[in-house]
């Protein structure tokens, strides 16, 4: 039997049919139709389900459930996208819209980071764990929490926003309006901002060379690679980043004492160059003074699809 999982992003809409074995039996990716109304987008999503059913030679009603993972905030009932700025979604009754096309099929809705954490629980770094935290280090910071072997959406079911925990008093202004949020100090965006500053102020720097003197060409990877090669300014940036990230992780450890913390997103691809100093600093800063299991997330680009498909199996209800 199969469940459908949607991973809805600002650039692409991904969908897959996930077998009970957690293998993706069939999948496809289409461009996200920016500017379209949500009912038209739901119609497009339904068309993808019909196509997958044809590919698998089954009826669309044979899918046991449909799960949707999307950026943004989800209401406590798990039926409405309250806001997803990059999608242009505000108070979108997505579950209701999908039920218009599949009235007999259970439809589930969750934040994409929550879904990714659920995927890691069923098929990745969190298998066999009761308490775990996923942090995604990308343009922003996402996070999902596993408590008691289930996805935890908070006491009032509004989810969690790890990226908006404050770790630096009077720090950089965040998109949420506060200062010093984890997202302002631990995202790829922060690395890019600092790299661009170096390009402008230090024309002899390694970052300047790799970006060909064009601040618009600066990426988080360029900054990290420059640090890996010993560029002085890049090393300063990277060390500050690691210090902030380790402080963020320690705050989570002090609250939840998770068995494992997994880091995903583009920045995590730095591998041991990132993980080794982060582990060392977390151990130094932690009250427990023990080494915590901090590992790469395993599922990468498939996490959204698998996690969305597994929403039906998550026993946490709100």
Image: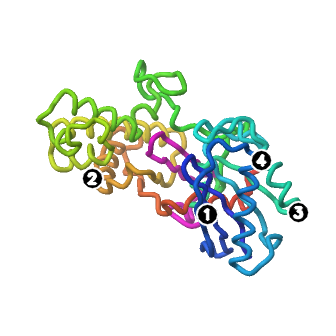
In the rendered image, the vertical position of residue 178 relative to residue 274, given as above or below = above
Label of residue 273 in the image: 2
Sequence-wise, the earlier of marks 4 and 1 is: 4
Sequence-wise, the earlier of marks 4 and 2 is: 4
**How is the structure coloured here?**
rainbow
Label of residue 39 in the image: 4
Residue 243 at x, y percent in the picture: 32, 37
Q: Residue at left 73%, top 66%?
A: 49
Would residue 168 appear left or right of 177 to someone viewing this image? left
Residue 244 at x, y percent in the picture: 36, 35
Sequence-wise, the earlier of marks 4 and 3 is: 4
In the rendered image, the vertical position of residue 50 relative to residue 35, given as above or below = below
Label of residue 104 in the image: 3
- In the rendered image, which quarter contains the C terminus? top right
Q: Residue at left 77%, top 47%?
A: 39
Q: Quadrant of residue 287?
A: top left
In the rendered image, the vertical position of residue 31 relative to residue 123, given as above or below = above
Residue placed most toward the observer, 66 or 235? 66
- Residue 135 is inside the magenta segment: yes
Q: Which residue is mark 1?
A: 306
Sequence-wise, the earlier of marks 1 and 3 is: 3
| Range covered by the magenta-colored residues | 123-147
Question: Real-space Cα distance between discs 4 and 3?
Answer: 18 Å
Residue 203 at x, y percent in the picture: 14, 33
Closer mark to the observer between disc 1 and disc 3: 3
Q: Are marks 4 and 3 in contact (CB under 8 Å)?
A: no
Q: Are marks 1 and 3 in contact (CB under 8 Å)?
A: no
């Amino acid at each position: 039997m199969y469940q459908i999982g949607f991973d809805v992003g600002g650039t692409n809409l991904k969908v897959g049919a996930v077998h009970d074995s957690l293998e993706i039996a069939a999948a496809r990716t289409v461009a996200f139709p920016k500017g379209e109304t949500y009912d038209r987008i739901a119609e497009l999503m339904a068309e993808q389900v019909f196509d997958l059913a044809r590919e698998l030679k089954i009826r669309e009603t044979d899918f046991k459930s449909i799960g949707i993972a999307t950026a943004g905030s989800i209401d406590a009932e798990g039926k409405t996208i309250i806001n997803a700025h990059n999608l242009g979604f505000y108070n979108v009754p997505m579950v209701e819209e999908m039920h218009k096309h599949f009235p007999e099929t259970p439809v589930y809705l969750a934040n994409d980071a929550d879904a990714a954490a659920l995927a890691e629980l069923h098929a990745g770094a969190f298998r066999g764990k009761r308490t775990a935290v996923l942090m995604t280090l990308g343009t922003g910071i996402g996070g999902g929490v596993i408590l008691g072997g289930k996805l935890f959406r908070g006491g009032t079911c509004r989810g969690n926003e790890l990226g908006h925990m404050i770790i630096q008093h009077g720090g950089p202004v965040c998109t949420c309006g506060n200062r010093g949020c984890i997202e302002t100090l631990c995202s790829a965006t922060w690395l890019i901002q600092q790299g661009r500053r170096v390009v402008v102020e230090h024309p002899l720097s390694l970052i300047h060379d790799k970006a060909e003197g064009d601040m618009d060409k600066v990426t988080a990877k360029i900054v990290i690679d420059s640090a890996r090669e010993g560029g002085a300014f890049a090393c300063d940036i990277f060390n500050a980043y690691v210090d902030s990230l380790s402080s963020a992780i320690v705050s989570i450890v002090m609250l939840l004492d998770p068995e494992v913390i997994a880091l995903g997103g583009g920045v995590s691809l730095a591998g041991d160059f990132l993980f080794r100093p982060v582990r060392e600093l977390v151990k130094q800063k932690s009250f427990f003074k023990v080494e915590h299991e901090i590992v790469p997330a395993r599922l990468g680009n498939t996490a959204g699809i698998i996690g969305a498909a597994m929403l039906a199996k998550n026993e946490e209800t709100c």
